Each structure stands twice: as structure tokens, then as C-alpha cells.
Amino acid sequence: MVEEEEEEEVRPPPPGFLPEWDGTEESFLEALATGRTLRNAPKLFVSATHTYSQQLAEQEYQKKEIRPVEEIVPKQYHEYLEVFSKEASERLP
């Protein structure tokens, strides 16, 4: 005769109840992954400012020389440069 095992209903803890940390790494990582807080668990503090790739990108950006608009825009469009200038955009028509 095969008896079926009844699955135990898993209910969330009541409000204000923090489960006790059992000291295992698995339970700590599971709590972190699910966003739960465990009593007596070690505190996790992350202090990250920039990644290495962000630092490299910032260094390259600082090396970049600023070229005048006349150098960037093709000569055939130079007659329209004033339309896109900051001073012209701040004036009312």
C-alpha cells in the first residue's frame, strides 16, 4: 500500500516575526535572494562607487578634445549653424 505524503502548507511568518538564522551559508543566501531578514544574521554592507569599466570610460572621456561645431558639421550645412546655436534657441522668434 502506497501512502501519499501530505505536503505541509508553508505560510509566511506573522508580521513582526523574524526567523532565527541557523548559521548556514545556504539559509543566509536564500534570505538575501528572497529579500527576507533573519535574526542574528551577519549584516551585509556593500560600498561600490564605480566599476572598472566606468573608470576607464571616464578616463577616455577626459582625454577627448572638444572640437568646434564648424569642424564637425559638413561645409555645405554651415549656413544653418545659427539655427542650432544655443543663443538662437534662447531668443523668441
Image (spheres, rainbow, N blue to C red):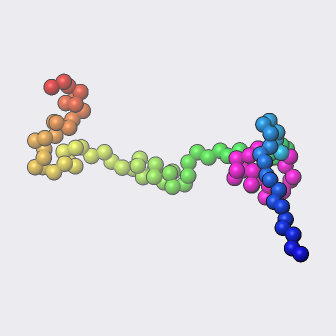
Q: Please, is residue 3 above or below residue 6 in the view?
A: below
Q: Where does residue 52 sit, x and y in percent of width and height?
A: 54, 54
Q: Pick the residue in front: 2 or 11.
A: 2
Q: Pick the residue in front: 61 or 49.
A: 49
Q: Please, is residue 24 above or below residue 39 in the view?
A: below
Q: Please, is residue 13 above or below residue 2 in the view?
A: above
Region rendered in magenta: 20-37
Task: Specify whether 18 is left or right of 54.
Answer: right
| Residue at image location 22% in from the left, 49% down from the top | 72
Q: Quadrant of residue 24?
A: bottom right
| Residue at image location 65% in from the left, 44% down from the top | 47
Whether residue 25 can be seen here: no
Examine the structure image and report whether residue 23 is included in the region drawn in magenta. yes
Q: Where does residue 88 sit, x and y in percent of width and height?
A: 19, 30
Q: Quadrant of residue 7?
A: bottom right
| Residue at image location 80% in from the left, 39% down from the top | 14
Task: Specify whether 65 is left or right of 81.
Answer: right
Whether residue 79 can be seen here: yes
Q: Quadrant of residue 81?
A: top left
Q: Pick the residue in front: 70 or 47.
A: 47
- The residue sitting at the bottom extreme is 1
